[in-house]
Structures are given as C-alpha cells and as structure tokens.
Image (spheres, grey):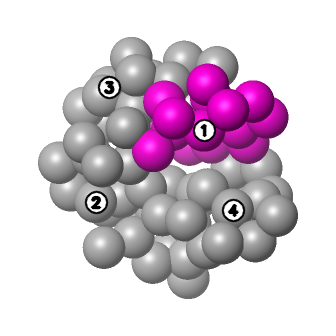
C-alpha cells in the first residue's frame, strides 16, 4: 500500500500520488497518460496532473488498482 510519507516530490498536490515503491513498470503511464509521467533520471512515475474529468478519474483508479506494487495512493484530499 502506498505511503504518503514516501510520496515523490515531483508529484503535484492533490489526492493521488506515487510513492517510492514504484518499479517503473509503465502501467500507470499507459493507462492514464494524461495524469502520470516518468521521471527519466530517477526511473519512476509520478502524478503530473490530478484527474479533472470523470474519464480521467476512471483511468486513474484503473491504474491504481492495476499497480503491481501498490505504489499509487489516494489520500482523499481534493
């Protein structure tokens, strides 16, 4: 389970985040490319845009549910 205390600093503020368990598998970037991107130097994904539409919400939830190491978290904040 993702831990907000270990959230990557590059991630934008909001409810979704990626923590340091990320293994750079590309699933979230493939599933929700409008919201997740890669930190090339660090070799991990992070949230660069919080979901703003119902469609983005669905894709981000799908990415979170599919993350093999549970590195995507939802802190419930707006």
Q: Return the mark for residue 15.
A: 4
Q: Are marks 1 and 3 in contact (CB under 8 Å)?
A: no
Q: Quadrant of the C terminus?
A: bottom right
- Numbered tag placed on residue 26 in the rendering: 3
Total marks placed: 4
Q: CA distance from mark 1 to mark 4?
A: 11 Å
Q: Residue at the spot x=56%, y=82% of the render? A: 5
Q: Nearer the viewer, mark 3 or mark 2?
A: 2
The mark that comes first in sequence, 4 or 3, is 4
67 to the left or right of 61: left
Q: Which residue is mark 1?
A: 57
What's the CA distance linking mark 2 and mark 1? 17 Å
Hey, which residue is sitting farthest bottom in the picture?
5
Question: Rounded to the nearest whole Å, what is the CA distance between mark 4 and mark 2?
Answer: 15 Å
Q: CA distance from mark 3 to mark 2?
A: 13 Å
Q: Nearer the viewer, mark 2 or mark 1?
A: 1
Q: Are marks 3 and 2 in contact (CB under 8 Å)?
A: no
Toward the left, the furthest residue is 68
């Amino acid at each position: 389970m993702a831990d907000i205390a270990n959230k990557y600093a590059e991630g934008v503020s909001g409810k979704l985040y990626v923590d340091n368990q990320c293994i750079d598998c590309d699933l979230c970037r493939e599933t929700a490319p409008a919201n997740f991107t890669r930190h090339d130097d660090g070799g991990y994904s992070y949230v660069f845009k919080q979901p703003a539409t119902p469609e983005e919400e669905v894709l981000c939830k799908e990415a979170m549910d599919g993350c093999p190491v549970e590195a995507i978290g939802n802190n419930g904040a707006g």
